[in-house]
């Protein structure tokens, strides 16, 4: 069973202009230490495959908003500590069943 999740819009992305210019590799390197994946506003059509090279199991927050994703990335379902997931302003048409693995998820924004 999926816990009750918020689906309200809470304003713009939380990324600073410097994080937008950060190479994607650096985003994942930083996420290993901070627990936050910040990939907003990158015109992504799919989740970066290079994420598999990094230890992201302790990720608690991910922001993939303002991209061009047509489905919620299955890779995000492997981050079992995820509490907050921002996916707003994409073209998401499907959500994988594996989302039920995110037992700690308390906030999900799909607008």
Image: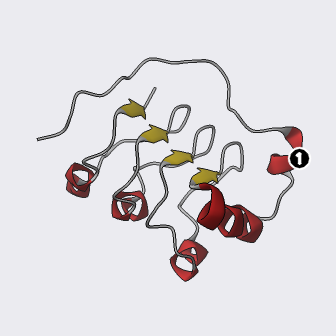
> Viewer-proximal residue, 48 or 45?
48
Give coordinates of residue 58: x percent, y percent.
46, 62
Question: Which residue lies most toward the left here?
Answer: 1
Give coordinates of residue 72: x percent, y percent.
40, 50
Does residue 92 appear to the left or right of 55 in the view shown? left
Q: How is the image coloured?
A: secondary structure
Residue linked to disc 1? 18
Q: Is 85 located above or below residue 52 in the figure?
A: above
Give the residue displayed 47% in from the left and 50% down from the top. Answer: 60
Give coordinates of residue 110: x percent, y percent.
42, 32
Give the residue displayed 52% in from the left and 32% down from the top. Answer: 88
Give coordinates of residue 78: x percent, y percent.
35, 65
Q: Quadrant of residue 32?
A: bottom right
> Viewer-proximal residue, 46 or 20?
20
Give the residue displayed 67% in from the left and 24% down from the top. Answer: 12
Report crowding for label 1: few under 14, some 14 to 19, many 20 or more residues within 10 A (C-alpha). Answer: few
Give the residue displayed 88% in from the left and 47% down from the top. Answer: 18
SS state under label 1: helix
Q: How many marks?
A: 1
Question: Which residue lies most toward the front here?
Answer: 33
């Amino acid at each position: 069973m999926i816990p009750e999740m918020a689906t309200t819009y809470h304003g713009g992305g939380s990324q600073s202009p410097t994080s937008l210019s950060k190479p994607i590799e650096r985003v994942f390197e930083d996420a290993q230490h901070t627990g936050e994946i910040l990939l907003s506003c990158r015109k992504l059509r799919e989740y970066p495959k290079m994420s598999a090279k990094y230890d992201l199991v302790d990720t608690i927050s991910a922001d993939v908003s303002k991209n061009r994703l047509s489905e919620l990335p299955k890779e995000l379902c492997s981050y079992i500590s995820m509490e907050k997931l921002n996916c707003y302003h994409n073209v998401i048409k499907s959500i994988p069943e594996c989302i039920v693995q995110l037992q700690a998820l308390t906030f999900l924004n799909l607008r």
